[in-house]
Image (tube, grey):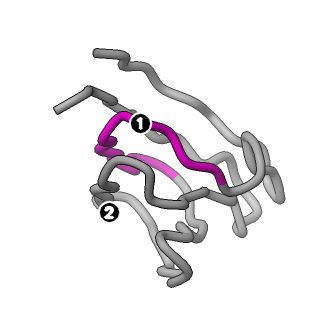
Amino acid sequence: PISGSLRLKAGMSPHPPHTHPEEEFMVITEGTGEILLDGKTTKIGPGSMMYCGANKSHGITNTGKTPLLFYFYKWKA
């Protein structure tokens, strides 16, 4: 398993939408943004959670004016 956190500055994304063989769970604790999951965009804020299955395209972008903080956990089923 891989876990960690990331703080995104306003307007930033850690990388373009991508896939990987692990499943992933994400929890947003600060800021606002959008998560793209398998072609669908969802607005997010504190308390939002995302589950992404293995090999599904996903990405996150800070669309707010303050930092966006999220925690992630990835594992192979």
**For the point 73% across and 40% down, which residue is it?**
14
The disc at residue 48 is 2
- For disc 2, the neighbor class at 10 Å (few under 14, some 14 to 19, many from 20) is some
Q: Quadrant of the C terminus?
A: top left
- The magenta segment is 18-30
Where is mark 1, residue-wise?
A: 21
The disc at residue 31 is none
**Which circle's residue, 1 or 2, is located before the other in the chain?**
1
Q: Quadrant of the N terminus?
A: top left
**For the point 30% across and 41% down, which residue is it?**
23
Q: With 57 as the anchor, is 73 left or right in this view?
A: left
Type of secondary structure dominating the magenta stretch:
strand
Rounded to the nearest angstrom, the CA distance separating label 1 from label 2 is: 23 Å
Q: Is residue 10 above or below residue 26?
A: below
**For the point 48% across and 80% down, which residue is it?**
42
What is the x, y in percent for residue 33? Answer: 60, 67
Element at badge 1? loop
